[in-house]
Amino acid sequence: MTAFETAQLAAQVLDTKKGEQVRILGIRDVSVLGDYFVIATGTSGTHVKALADEVEFRLGEAGVRPHHVEGYRSNSWILLDYGEVVVHVFTRQSREFYDLDRLWQNGEPIPVENTES
């Protein structure tokens, strides 16, 4: 699975599970951290954990495993690092505080592909 496909699948899973403000940012041209950030907001700490769990499960089914996971104890920002793709799932307050959307504004916004046929 390519990095683009991984980012798309993660974003689609987040959208399907009612993640809010789901975005994919292409960061390849502005950072060495990876190719894509996928950013989403959950409505509560429990929702954030459920979103991250579902992304990890669904990508795992596709044969993609995270290299590193951070934040499960706090449930306000969970980071799933898949190497070329980094998934960030926030509570509203944490997303506003860390403001990755502004920090990575030079990244390329990538549309989330529709999963419906």
Image (tube, helix red, strand yellow):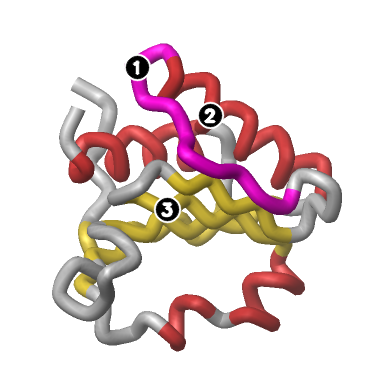
Q: Do labels 1 and 3 touch, CB within 8 Å?
A: no
Q: Nearer the viewer, residue 15 or 9?
A: 9
- Mark identifier at residue 82: none
The image quarter in which residue 18 lies: top right
**Is residue 109 toward the left or the right of residue 90 in the image?**
left
Q: Secondary structure at mark 1?
A: loop
- Mark identifier at residue 86: 3
Q: Secondary structure at mark 3?
A: strand
Distance from the alpha carbon under mark 2 to that under mark 3: 12 Å
Give me the residue at 45% from left, 19% from top: 60
- Mark identifier at residue 63: 1
Q: Amino acid at mark 3?
A: Val
- Mark identifier at residue 56: 2
The image quarter in which residue 25 lies: bottom left
Q: Nearer the viewer, residue 21 or 31?
A: 31
Q: Amino acid at mark 1?
A: Gly
Residue 108: x percent and y percent? Answer: 20, 72
**First in residue order: circle 2 vs circle 3:** 2
Distance from the alpha carbon under mark 2 to that under mark 1: 10 Å
Label 3 Cα neighbours within 10 Å, binned few <14 / some 14-19 / many ≥20: many
Image quadrant containing the N terminus: top left
Asked if the stretch drawn in magenta spans residue 68, the answer is: yes
Give me the residue at 63% from left, 30% from top: 53
Magenta part of the chain: 61-71
Q: Secondary structure at mark 2?
A: helix
Asked if the stretch drawn in magenta spans residue 51, the answer is: no
Give me the residue at 28% from left, 41% from top: 8
Residue 69: x percent and y percent? Answer: 60, 44
Q: Amino acid at mark 2?
A: Glu
**First in residue order: circle 1 vs circle 3:** 1
Residue 11: x percent and y percent? Answer: 39, 43
Image quadrant containing the C terminus: top left
